[in-house]
Image (cartoon, rainbow, N blue to C red):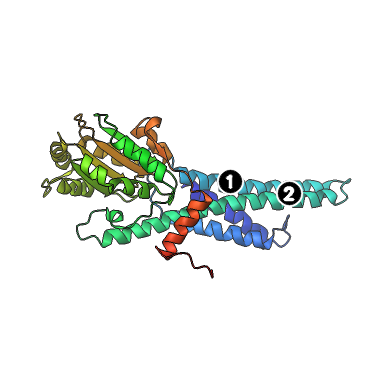
Amino acid sequence: MAAYAALVSLKRIIDDIETHPSPPISLDKQQVKSLTEIVTFLQEFLEGYKSPYEYSDEADPLEIRIMDASHTTEDVIESYIIDTIQLSASTTNDGADEQISCIHFYQDLQNVIEHMDLIKKEVTAITMEKEVHKRNVASDDVGLKSSSTEKKHLMVGFDDVLLQLLDRLTDGNTSRQIIPIVGMGGIGKTTLAKGAFEHKFIKEHFDICVWATISQDYNVVETLREVLTRVGGSSSSMDEKELEVRLHKCLWGRRYLIILDDMWSIDVWDRLKFSFPNCSEGSRIVVTTRMSNLVAHLTDSYSVFKMRFLDEVSSWTLFSKTVFGEQSFPTHL
C-alpha cells in the first residue's frame, strides 16, 4: 500500500533526525509531537482500512491524499536539510540567512501538519460513522442495513434544497431518474434524503418507498433480499441473480422510490441497477455518497445535488436543537 509506505518513510526520517547524535537540523518539539501523533494514527487506520476501490482499476482518493501529504511533508524536511548544509558551507553567510531559512521551514512544516491534521479529522469521521453503522446493523432484527431511517434527523438550513429535491422527485418526468446527493461525511446527505423520504407528499406520490443503507461493508444479496421483502415479494433461498429478476418483476409497472444511502463503490450500483426497471412510471432512485468520482457513473451533472456547508446562523440553530431539543438556549451559558 503506497500510502502506508509513505507514512513509514516519513516517520523514519523524523526518528532519524530525533535520534541522531549530531542531526543536520533541529525540529520543533511540538511540531514533532503533532506530526508523530498524526502519522501513527493514519498508520493504524490504514492497517484495518478496507478500500472501496480494492477491486477497481481506480485509485482510492483518500489513500492518494494521505500519500501526497506524507511525501510533501518529507520534501519540506529534506529541502530544509539541504538548505542548512549549503548555508553552513557558505563562506559569506553571517547567520541571518540561516535564521530566515529556519523561520520559513517552521511555517512550511506547520502548513503541512495542519493539512495532515485535516485528513486525520476526516478519517476519524469515517471511523466513527462506520462504528455507528455496525451498532445499528447489529440491533436490527431483520438484518436490513437501514437503521438510519429510524433515527430522528434535524432539518436545519436545507429547506430550499429539500424543496428542489421534492420537485425533482415529482416533476412529472415519466422516465426513471437517478438523483445523487454528494458531499463530505456528516454534511447532511442522509438528513436531506430522509426529509424527502418521510415527506407526506412523497408517500402519496409513489406506490413504493424503500430505504436501504449500503455503507462501505456492503452486502448486495442482503440488500436485494430486504428490498424485495419490503415490496411484497418472497426472497427465500434465492441467489443474487434470482433476486435481481424477482425484484425487477415486482417493481415493473409501479412508481417506486428507492433510497440507496451511503454508497462507496460503483460496484454496488453495477450489481443493483438491473433490478430497478425503467417502465415509464416516473420512478426515482436517490443515491447519497461522499465519493464525487462515483457520481459520474450514475448520471449527468444536472441531476446532482451537491451539499453545501451551513452558514453560521444555521450551524448555531442545529447545535442548539441537538443539545437542548425544543427548550430555549440557557442564557446563563
Residue 67, how many percent across, how many down?
Answer: 53, 46
Q: Which residue is mark 2?
A: 104
Residue 257, how many percent across, how many down?
Answer: 24, 41
Q: Is residue 88 above or below residue 241?
A: below
Residue 9, how many percent across, how many down?
Answer: 57, 51
Under circle 2, the secondary element is helix
Q: Which mark is residue 71?
A: 1
Q: Quadrant of residue 325?
A: bottom left
The C terminus lies in quadrant: bottom right
| Residue drawn where x is 48% and y is 64% of the image | 329
Q: Is residue 309 left or right of residue 102?
A: left
Can see residue 40?
yes
Under circle 1, the secondary element is helix
| Residue drawn where x is 20% and y is 61% of the image | 141
Amino acid identity at mark 1: His
Q: Are marks 1 and 2 in contact (CB under 8 Å)?
A: no
**Among all residues in the image, which is located at the extreme bottom?**
332
The front one of 332 and 249 is 332
Residue 289, how many percent across, how many down?
Answer: 38, 44
Amino acid identity at mark 2: His
Foreground label between 1 and 2: 2
Q: Dot 2: few (<14), some (14–19), or many (≥20) neighbours within 10 Å? A: few
Q: Is residue 169 above or below residue 198?
A: above
Q: Is residue 147 left or right of residue 225?
A: right
Q: CA distance from mark 1 to mark 2?
A: 18 Å
Q: Dot 1: few (<14), some (14–19), or many (≥20) neighbours within 10 Å? A: some
The front one of 23 and 329 is 329
| Residue drawn where x is 39% and y is 30% of the image | 302
Which of marks 2 and 1 precedes in the sequence? 1
Can see residue 58?
no
Q: Quadrant of residue 177?
A: top left
